[in-house]
Amino acid sequence: KLNYLEELIDEEYLDEKDESSLREGLYAGLLAGLKDPYSTYYTAEQYKELNTSNEGSYVGIGAVLQKDDTGGAKIIQLYEGGPGEQAGLKKGDVIKAVDGADVTDKETSVTLTIQRENEEKTRDVKVEIRDVEIQTVSHEMLSEDTGYIRISEFSEVTSDQYKKAFADLKEQGMKKLVVDLRDNPGGLLTAVCGVLR
């Protein structure tokens, strides 16, 4: 069947075929045939992307963005201590433009044109581009003796962030703790074990 399909592609396919893509598709199809959700084939690029999402850090401005009704990108979260927060960006700001320069790994900063909530005029903010640790843990005191920790996902940075949050709450007089895992999609088992230690 494989030989027949290769011949058919050679004879009938109009565009140029990419041998590498065909091989990768063959490997992916082989594992997909198992019908096992835990058995998956990743290309080198897909594997790198998967590992990057589990590392808990990336290069950027330290902001979570969401498409805005006006067509811009609205900042819905700023990572504490990240370059965006340090540059003066605020939650609710809408990014209207990014400077015309190509943003590659050689770039060290970008100028964002933003519109602040309840302000008519836009303003330019220069923000450094660097490694940003994703905040997977947030915390606060709910009452005089009850602490609250929310874990949004389990990545490589979660265990350390949890320990810092726990220590901070203890320092504030925490005697009881609520751990919120709602909407947490999971992640690294090692991170879960690190939190439980």
Image (cartoon, rainbow, N blue to C red):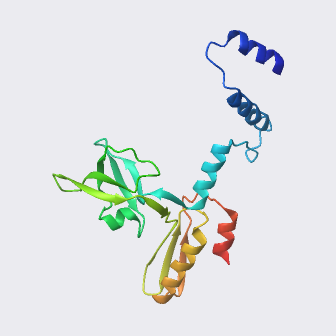
Left or right of residue 127: residue 185: right
The residue that appears at 45% across and 88% down in the rendered structure is 172
Is residue 15 shown above or below 85? above
The image shows residue 18, relative to residue 161, as above or below, that is above
**Residue 101 lies in quadrant:** top left
Is 12 drawn above or below residue 133 in the view shown?
above
User: On the rendered image, what quadrant is the C terminus found in?
Assistant: bottom right
Q: In this view, does 72 lie to the left or right of 150?
A: left
In the image, farthest residue toward the left: 120
- Residue 116 placed where, x, y %? 24, 56
Residue 127: percent from left, percent from top? 34, 59
Q: Position of residue 9 (x, y in %)?
A: 72, 15
Q: Please name the residue shown 36% across and 62% down the image.
A: 84
Q: Which of the two residues, 121 or 9, is positioned nearer the viewer here?
A: 9
Q: In which quarter of the image is residue 37?
A: top right
Q: Residue furthest front?
A: 106
Q: Can residue 65 be seen in this view?
A: yes
Give left or right: position of 150 versus 9.
left
In this view, the residue farthest toward the top is: 11
Total numbered labels placed on residues in the image: 0
Instruction: Write the residue at 34% across / 67% down.
Output: 86
- The reply to whether residue 1 is in sight is no
The answer to whether 53 is drawn above or below residue 158 in the figure is above
In front of the other: 155 or 57: 57
Q: In which quarter of the image is the N terminus?
A: top right
The percent coordinates of residue 28 (x first, y second) are: 73, 36
Q: Which residue is drawn at 30% across and 58% down?
A: 126
